[in-house]
Image (tube, rainbow, N blue to C red):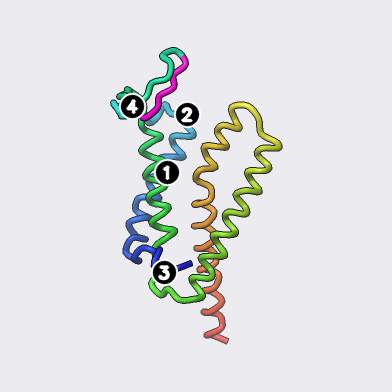
Amino acid sequence: MSNRLLLSNRYKKIGWFILIPATILGIILIITQFEGLSFEAKTFAIINDEIIGGRKFFTLIDTNISNTVIGILFIVGGLLVGFSKEKTEDEFIANLRQSSLLWAVFVNYILLLASFAFIYGTAFFNVMVYNMFTVLIIFIARFNYMLYRNSKLIADEKYN
């Protein structure tokens, strides 16, 4: 992965500052089924497809934007965390980043295949919504776990 595509290391802290609250709010939103967090606003919609009102294009609508705001914050925070340079960004870290990203995509599609095979109805729609976030979640978890594991190995070698 080219270092030119990575953000400065300072964005990682900003990313964690956004990602952690967005994750907590997202979990609350899932648990309360949109009842606990409700923020109504008039927003611009390119397409709005309602059961009763029909399909409208390029219009203003009144809607609950809680899930939209939390989703945007989660994605922005996740991208800042996942794609900001480490303090010491070398070839080993770049290789670790690339392998973690490939691993995350692979695991994500295995989970998606299992979902296609075993989950049906409205639960499948929920899985598809959550699937938008799983590559970022798996990548960040795997990359940081591998960084932690390798830092422990290096620390153990210094003491031996």
Give amino acid for label 4.
Phe
Please name the residue that numbered disc 2 is placed on. 33
Q: Measured from the top left, where is residue 69 in percent x and y?
A: 36, 38
**Which tag, 2 or 1, sits closer to the chain's start?**
1
| Callout 3 crowding tier (Cα within 10 Å): few <14, some 14–19, many ≥20 | some
Q: What residue lies at 53% left-to-right and 70% top-to-bottom?
A: 95
- Mark 2 burial class by Cα count in 10 Å: few <14, some 14-19, many 20+: few
> Which badge, 4 or 3, is on the more N-terminal residue?
3
Q: CA distance from mark 2 to mark 4?
A: 28 Å
Q: Earlier in the sequence, mark 1 or mark 4?
A: 1
Task: Inspect the magenta stretch and tell me whether residue 50 lies in it.
Answer: yes
The C terminus, quarter of image: bottom right
Q: Which residue is mark 4?
A: 58
| Residue kind at label 3, given as amino acid type | Asn
Give the CA distance from mark 1 to mark 4. Answer: 33 Å
- Label 1: few (<14), some or many (≥20) within 10 Å? few
Image: magenta residue range = 45-51
Say what secondary structure mark 1 lies in: helix
Amino acid type at mark 2? Gln
Residue 105 spot, x, y in % from top left:
58, 54
Q: Which residue does the numbered mark 1 point to in the structure image?
A: 24
Write the residue at 36% across / 63% down: 7
